[in-house]
């Protein structure tokens, strides 16, 4: 495929002609090989370049540069800090997308563990709607369903509950498009991050009586509210409670669909459809014709298949996606069915000649053209793709493989592969929607993020351009991070490894780390006195041939795998944790591994003084200990082990070869990481926590003696940044509780006094890491489990 370079290609700026959502893309207008949607050849063209500055810019692909900065949507704050995302653009499962039916450009997206978002067309990005959720309610950020009001565009509801094992979920209601929410109890566990999470929508508002809502639960059947979500009760007339089970979780009821044209009364719409996520004989589609008083299983349809989505077009025809399993995985087969509600006729309209084992994730209809339907494959990984029909399923056009894909600066979508061909990272395509106000505009969600097209109704697939629309929708799970110590921020995240940002507000043009590419990054550390030296560890995948560690000598721009592995070949291991000496000459590696066929894991801590060419087990340190390097003395490392309710601190003075216990008399509350500030030898902090409580300890004697920080009632994460003017000790940043308030705090006097730096609208409930910036006083980074990396600066 020819790149869309300025010197050779005729460029059309699609943003100027296709609408306001999304930055410009480029396609060639003179393609001799344009294929029909079902053909095997691709047209030329269609590659967009990347953003970035400084030395990183040389790593991207040529083409138009995405100069727009991220972090600009929804960042207004009346609190002490202004908060933005470190720009990665995506990386997590967007399992549901919902357009408002009454307001143009009003779109909501839900994620499986990172909360909900609203599209902001003026900012050309997404606005996070759940940053206000507190740590005590962190289970609310796995969004099970979203329902915009079909009459009042300002009202929107969300069902929140990440895991069923965490108890009942919550129904959130907003009257200002998600700027603020009230919470309402519901006796229904939810599974925003378990199997079946891309089904839906489970939450639905009666278009003829908007105070009436149904929620299709996973384990307690159909729930009803008649007072705008304030109170909920079970619909005892509905015959099914739990549906099938997948990986120990009930799938329950998959969606609720109202017929807005059905007879109405004081009780609202008379006709309501509910899907049941089960593979029992029959359609697993139920209908009520009397406003929910009675329900009947609809005869006919597929058998041994469960409906994931069911939508009605303007003519009253229902289109449904059926699958053998729950999704987003474990689907062996599926189909697309049409149900004529007026006659009861069922027709299998599944797109033919797709090939391979897969299902169909999402289904959507064109509000302006009956018979125009789009579906998405799921669990195919060929990759998954959208498919469209304009004649009710008689003929289909494939709009994925043969279309063009603009990464919009998110170079990580190439997953470490060289070259500048169109990336088409599209797994777990569980949701797809056609804009009810614009038939050419369609959006689909994937396990990596959101793609959008403004010419999705093109007759030729190779003319269609999909743009990755994830600006400000950051759903990575952060596992480690190295703040800006040498002109760049280095991230360590789940699923997409991590990347190097020279510009916090633009995604890295280098994409994710390479050589090797990990499935998930587990640890990242740097040499404090020589930050060009960085070490990284992560999980194995098919691309890295079992390489679980690497080092860099240019601050993460390029990497070299460790030449050897600390344990013998044939083991099953995770990436573990790393600690790099202050001068970069020694690397400690703590990991767990299993020797098949054994199932019990073994721990080991080893040290290398030759960048992984050889590894030697350390002595004197328990194998399950947490590790850290002194940031000033290159010969000094620390370890902490907790066993039988006793915590012990260890120190090495010979670059990690041997360790000596220096004390075990302090009544530490539990396990926790050691945190070491830069520039001070022998200074160690311990975040010690158990299931019941946590505390913060500080030592200025290389761990020989610790003192509890009395002002801290609970500590969850700790980090350090540039000292305040007039002081020499680094600023200390805490995620914890001070004076009964849980939040993020800064201390300029080693923990004696603390200033809260967040506000109630920015609580980042899934935070697990915090760090300051060593070059910029006041700047702080917060690593979250599902909301990516947030950075904050003092408000002007």
Image (cartoon, rainbow, N blue to C red):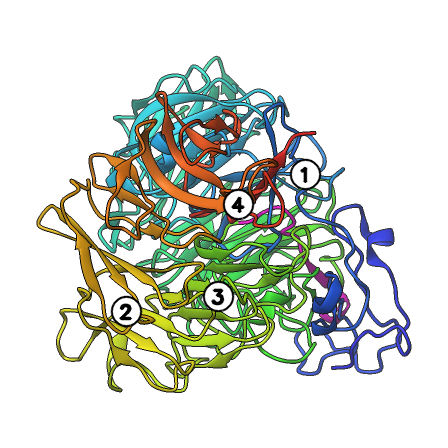
Which of the pair 767/532 is nearer the observer?
A: 532
Spatial CA span between label 2 and label 4: 28 Å
Left or right: 566 in relation to 94: left
Please tell me whether mark 1 sits on a helix, a strand or a loop.
loop
Q: Which residue is drawn at 45% across and 76% down?
A: 550
Q: Give me the disc on residue 73.
A: 1
Spatial CA span between label 3 and label 2: 20 Å
Q: Is residue 339 visible?
A: yes
Please tell me whether mark 2 sits on a helix, a strand or a loop.
strand
The residue wearing badge 3 is: 527
* Residue 597 position within the rendered picture, expressed as x and y whole percent measured from the top left: 14, 79
Magenta segment boundaries in residue numbering? 459-474
- Nearest to viewer (mark 3 / mark 2): 3
Spatial CA span between label 1 and label 2: 40 Å
* Circles 1 and 4 in contact, beta carbons < 8 Å: no
Spatial CA span between label 3 and label 4: 16 Å
Spatial CA span between label 1 and label 4: 26 Å
* Circles 3 and 2 in contact, beta carbons < 8 Å: no
Counting residues from the start of the chain, the first of labels 3 and 4 encountered is 3
The residue wearing badge 4 is: 721
Counting residues from the start of the chain, the first of labels 1 and 3 encountered is 1
């Amino acid at each position: 495929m020819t790149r869309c370079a300025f010197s050779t290609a005729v460029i059309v700026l699609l943003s100027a002609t296709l609408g306001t959502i999304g930055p410009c893309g480029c396609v060639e207008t003179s393609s001799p090989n344009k294929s029909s949607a079902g053909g095997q050849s691709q047209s030329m063209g269609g590659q967009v370049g990347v953003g970035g500055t400084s030395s990183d810019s040389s790593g991207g692909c040529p083409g138009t540069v995405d100069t727009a900065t991220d972090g600009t949507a929804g960042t207004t704050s009346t609190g002490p800090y202004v908060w933005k995302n470190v720009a990665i653009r995506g990386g997590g499962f967007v399992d549901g997308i919902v357009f408002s039916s009454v307001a143009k450009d009003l779109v909501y997206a839900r994620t499986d563990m990172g909360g909900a978002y609203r599209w902001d067309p003026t900012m050309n990005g997404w606005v996070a709607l759940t940053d206000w959720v507190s740590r005590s309610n962190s289970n609310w950020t796995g969004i099970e369903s979203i329902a915009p009001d079909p009459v009042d565009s300002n009202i929107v509801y969300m069902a929140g509950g990440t895991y069923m094992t965490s108890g009942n979920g919550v129904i959130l209601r907003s009257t200002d498009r998600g700027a603020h929410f009230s919470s309402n109890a519901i006796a229904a566990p939810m599974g925003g991050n378990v199997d079946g999470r891309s089904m839906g929508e489970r939450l639905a508002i009666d278009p003829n009586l908007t105070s009436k809502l149904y929620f299709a639960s996973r384990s307690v059947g159909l729930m009803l509210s008649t007072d705008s979500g304030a109170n909920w009760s079970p619909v005892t007339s509905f015959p099914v409670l739990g549906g099938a089970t997948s990986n120990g979780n009930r799938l329950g009821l998959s969606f609720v669909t109202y017929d807005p044209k059905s007879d109405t009364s004081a009780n609202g719409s008379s006709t309501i459809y509910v899907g049941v996520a089960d593979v029992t004989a029959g359609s697993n589609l139920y209908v009520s014709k009397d406003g929910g008083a009675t329900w009947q299983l609809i005869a006919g349809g597929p058998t041994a298949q469960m409906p994931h989505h069911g939508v009605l077009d303007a003519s009253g025809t229902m289109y449904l996606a059926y699958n053998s399993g729950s999704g987003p995985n474990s689907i062996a087969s599926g189909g697309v069915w049409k149900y004529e509600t007026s006659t009861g006729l069922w027709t299998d309209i599944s797109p033919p000649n797709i090939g391979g084992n897969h299902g169909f994730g999402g289904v959507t209809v064109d509000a302006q053209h009956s018979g125009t339907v789009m579906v998405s494959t799921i669990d195919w990984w060929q990759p998954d793709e959208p498919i469209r029909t304009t004649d009710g399923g008689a003929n289909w056009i494939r709009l994925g493989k043969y279309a063009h894909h603009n990464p919009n600066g998110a170079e990580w979508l190439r997953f470490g592969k060289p070259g500048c061909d169109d990336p088409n990272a599209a797994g777990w395509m569980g949701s797809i929607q056609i804009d009810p106000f614009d038939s050419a505009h369609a959006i689909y969600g994937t396990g990596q993020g959101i793609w959008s097209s403004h010419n999705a109704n093109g007759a030729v697939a190779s003319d269609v351009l999909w743009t990755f629309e994830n600006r400000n929708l950051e759903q990575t799970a952060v596992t480690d991070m190295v703040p800006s110590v040498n002109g760049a921020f280095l991230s360590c995240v789940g699923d997409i490894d991590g990347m190097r940002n020279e510009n916090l507000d633009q995604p890295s043009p280098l994409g994710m780390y390479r050589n090797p590419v990990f499935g998930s990054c587990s640890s990242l550390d740097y040499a404090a006195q020589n930050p060009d030296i960085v070490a990284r560890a992560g999980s194995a995948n098919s691309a890295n041939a079992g390489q679980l560690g690497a080092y860099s000598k240019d601050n993460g721009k390029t990497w070299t795998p460790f030449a050897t592995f600390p344990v013998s070949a044939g083991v099953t291991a995770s990436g573990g944790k790393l600690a790099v000496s202050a001068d970069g000459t020694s690397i400690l590696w703590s990991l767990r591994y299993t020797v098949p066929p054994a199932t019990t894991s073994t721990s080991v801590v080893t040290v290398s003084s030759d960048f992984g060419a050889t590894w030697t087990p350390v002595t004197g340190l328990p194998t399950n200990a947490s590790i850290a390097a002194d940031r000033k003395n290159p010969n000094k490392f620390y370890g902490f082990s907790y066993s039988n309710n006793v915590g012990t601190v260890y120190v090495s003075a010979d670059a990690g070869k041997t360790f000596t216990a220096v004390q075990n008399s302090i009544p530490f509350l539990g396990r926790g990481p050691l945190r070491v500030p830069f520039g001070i030898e022998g200074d160690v902090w311990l975040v010690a926590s158990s299931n019941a409580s946590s505390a913060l300890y500080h030592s200025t004697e290389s761990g020989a003696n610790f003192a509890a920080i009395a002002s801290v009632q609970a500590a969850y994460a700790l980090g350090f940044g540039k000292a305040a003017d007039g002081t020499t000790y680094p600023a200390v940043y805490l995620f914890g509780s001070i004076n009964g308030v849980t939040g993020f705090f800064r201390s300029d006097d080693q923990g004696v006094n603390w200033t809260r730096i967040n506000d109630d609208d920015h609580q980042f409930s899934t935070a697990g890491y915090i760090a300051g910036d060593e070059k910029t006083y006041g700047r702080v980074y917060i690593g979250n489990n599902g909301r990516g990396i947030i950075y904050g600066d003092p408000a002007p």
